[in-house]
Amino acid sequence: MSVRLRWLLIVLGLLVICVPLAILFLRTHERVTHIEHLPPQGEASYNALYVLGQALRADGITVQSRPRLDLTRMPLEPGDTVVLLQDSGEVPAPAVTELMAWVAKGGHLIVRTPPIGKDSAGNGPLLDALGVDSEGYESYCQRFHVRDDPQHVEFCNGRRFSAEPPAGVTLERGWGDDYDLVFARLRHGQGRIDVLADMAFMHGKGRPNPSVPPNAANAFVDDLHDKAHRDLTRYVLAPNYGKGTMWLVYASRPPSLWNRVFYLGWPVWAPLLLALLGWLWQRAQRLGSELPSPAAERRSLLEHIRASGEHLLRFGKAPLLYDAVRGAFLARLRRRSPTAAALTGEAQVHAIAAVLQWSHERVRTALTPPASHDVAGLRDRIRLLIQMRTLL
């Protein structure tokens, strides 16, 4: 078979296999486009007013975003607006004095009441200077009439308040119920101060509203893409809109370096950590010895003693065994009856017999050494000496 014919057969075989498979795939599969909404990245992940700032920039307004209120780095002008999402109770008294002087010259300050859960923190110097009291007030939704959404509500998660402005500050408009407010516009000099129970409608990403069903039209209360929220935001920003700079204090800090390294850099540090652990395991000292365990003793201590005694008997060393037992008895006798131990001869025999209440002959037999080859006498005397030592 020639090379050309061989390649021709291979191509024909591939066509016979691949063409039906391609037709089957095209008839059983359909191309579908799916849009996946990824979580916010970068500044949008920690700046709740990021979308508001982008919308204002698109409208030709100068916007400056700050994580915290820092008047030393914020050159405020009379036509500027400050949206203070930061907890108003954290503003120190010197900063309150500067803010009030700036508002009197034509500035616009927008603040919110302290969030729920900070009852012990009090109102703070800023709200006290405005005559606003939020201590002890609860949080519930406020009806906000919208043509396309008659059930629309706002300020569901903010602390309501009451307003009794001091001298020099007047209440221009209030919105709420008969006993508490959710919005108050105060006039101070040439500027205005807006106090709100919550600024959730200015946020750029929605979160569920716990007061309404999930499938309701107002299920997300803090999404700036809602028309009602845009209208309300435009009304709040109206006094100095387009006049000066919008300062957005979003009361947040970007993630720390360690946070980014831990959550975003795990594809790098996790393999390195595993490699380090493997190297340490390889270099670490073994927990067990590679040498075999030593052989256990094949005889117990009693067997050794018995074998030693039999060895002495076999080689005529019986007196050594007797002397050892007699020495043990006399050592205990010196501790228990020193007087008897100090005697010798028959006097000692009589003293020991009196102490043990034995007969003299029995004690004398125990204290008399046996003949070197008298095994029976040796055993009898050792037994008597052990009994006498036990009775002492």
Image (cartoon, rainbow, N blue to C red):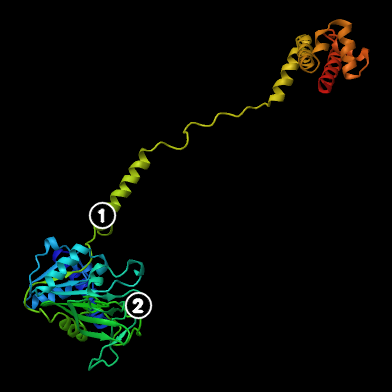
Using the image, tell me which numbered label, if any, was put on residue 348: none
Quarter of the image that includes the N terminus? bottom left
| Residue toward you, 215 or 99 | 99
| Residue toward you, 222 or 365 | 222
Q: CA distance from mark 1 to mark 2?
A: 39 Å
Element carrying mark 1: helix
Where 93 sits versus 355, above or below?
Answer: below
Residue type at numbered disc 2: Tyr
| Residue toward you, 122 or 214 | 122
Q: Residues within 10 Å of mark 1 (few under 14, many from 20)?
A: few
* In the image: residue 31, left or right of residue 76: right
Residue at the spot of label 2: 137
Q: Whole-percent x and y of residue 209?
A: 32, 80
Q: Is residue 39 visible?
A: no
In the picture, residue 167 is in which quadrant?
A: bottom left
Using the image, tell me which numbered label, if any, was put on residue 258: 1
Q: Residues within 10 Å of mark 2 (few under 14, many from 20)?
A: some
Q: Is residue 97 visible?
A: yes
